[in-house]
Image (tube, grey):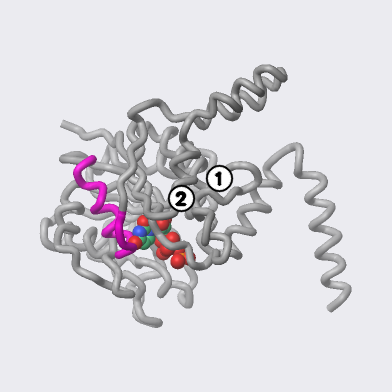
Amino acid sequence: MRSKVTKAIFPVAGLGTRFLPATKSVPKEIMTLVDRPLVQYAIDEARAAGIKEFIFVTSRGKGALEDYFDNAPQLEQELRRKGKDELLDILRNTNMDSGEVAYMRQHKPLGLGHAVWCARRLIANEPFAVILPDDVIAADKPCLAQMVEAFEETQSNIVAAMEVPEDKASAYGVLDIKEDMGQIVSTKGMVEKPARGEAPSNLAVIGRYILTPTVLQKLNKKKAGAGGEIQLTDAIADAREEAGEEVYGFRFSGQRFDCGSKAGFLQATVAFALARDELREDLMNFLNDTVYAQKAAQ
Ligand code: UTP
C-alpha cells in the first residue's frame, strides 16, 4: 500500500544566535518577512502539500510562537466591530484547528537530528515531512508539494537539494550522488559540513525533507556528528547504509532564502516585498535611488 505524508515536524528549538540580540526575547521563527512571521510561510507550505498535523519542537523562550497559533477572539471582535473584514480574513487564516498542532519540548539544543527525534512518539510508523522555517522558498508550486508528488512515486526518503558554490559547501549537508536523473538524484551517502575541498558534490541539502520512520530509529543512537551536534543527515545516511533504504535528492523549482542568516533574511524581505502590488513601486524607487547614491559615493 502506498503511504501518504500527513504529518510535518517543524524544529524551532535552536538558539538563533546569528540574530542576537533580537533572539534574546523574540523567537527567530516569529520574525517577519513583510508582515508574516517565518513560521506562517512554513505552515502555508505544509498545508498546500496536504499536511494535516503540525508538530513543533520548541524550547525555552519560544512562548510567543505558541501564542501565535492561538485564536485571538478579542482582536477578531474588534476588527468585526470596525468592519475591517479584510484584516479579519487574514487573521482567521492563521488560526489552527484544535488538535491540529502539537508542541514537543527539546530540553537542550543538541542538534537538528535530536530535535526531530524528540517528536518520534507523535509520528509512529509512517513517513513524515520536516520543514525548517528559516529556509523560505518562493515557488509557483510550493516546494513541499513538489516533494510530496515525487514521494508518491519513490515511497522513500527525499531531501530538498540545490547547487551551491564550492566554497559554500562546508556549511551544508552535501549529497554523494549515485545517479543523476535530472530533477531527482539517487545517492550513495551524504556528508554533513564537509571540510573544504572534500565535498562529494555541489548538491547541498536544504530545509525540506520527507523521511521514513527508519530515520527516527537511527536517531535513537543519538550519536553526535559535525559540530558536536546530533545531525539529521547522519541518520538519513544510516537509513541508506544500514537499512538499505533509498535516499533521493530533489532539485526543487523555486528560490530559497536562508532566513537563518542576516543577508538571506534581508534578501527575502526585499523579494517578498517586491512581490506585493501595494509595496512594489515605492520600494523599487527607494532601491534604485539608494543603489544610485551608493554607487555615486564610491
Ligand atoms: P540552525 O543551524 O539555524 O541553528 O538550525 P539555530 O540555533 O536556529 O541558529 P544559529 O545558528 O544559532 O543562528 C537549523 C534548524 O534546526 C533547529 C533550528 O530551530 C532551525 O530551525 N534546531 C537546531 C533545533 O530545533 N534544535 C537544535 O538543537 C538545533
Q: Residue at x 37, y 43 (%)?
A: 147
Secondary structure category for the residue under label 1: strand
Asked whether residue 137 is in view, the answer is: no
Quarter of the image where one finds residue 185: bottom left
> Is 148 on the left or on the right of 164, as rendered?
left
Disc ID at residue 133: 2
Give the amino acid at mark 2: Pro
Q: Which of the pair 258/101 is nearer the observer?
A: 101
Could you say where residue 111 lies in the image, as x and y percent from the top left? 32, 63
Residue 146, percent from left and from top: 41, 41
Query: What is the C-alpha distance between the residues marked 1 and 2?
Result: 9 Å
Magenta stretch, residue numbers: 106-122
What's the amino acid at mark 1? Pro
Q: Is residue 36 magenta?
A: no
Tell me the number on the disc at residue 297.
none
Is 281 positioned to the left or the right of 33 in the image? right
Q: Would you call the spot at circle 1 few (<14 residues within 10 Å), some (14-19), or many (20 or more)?
A: some
Which residue matches tag 1? 37
Is the N terminus in the top left, top right, bottom left or bottom right quadrant? top left
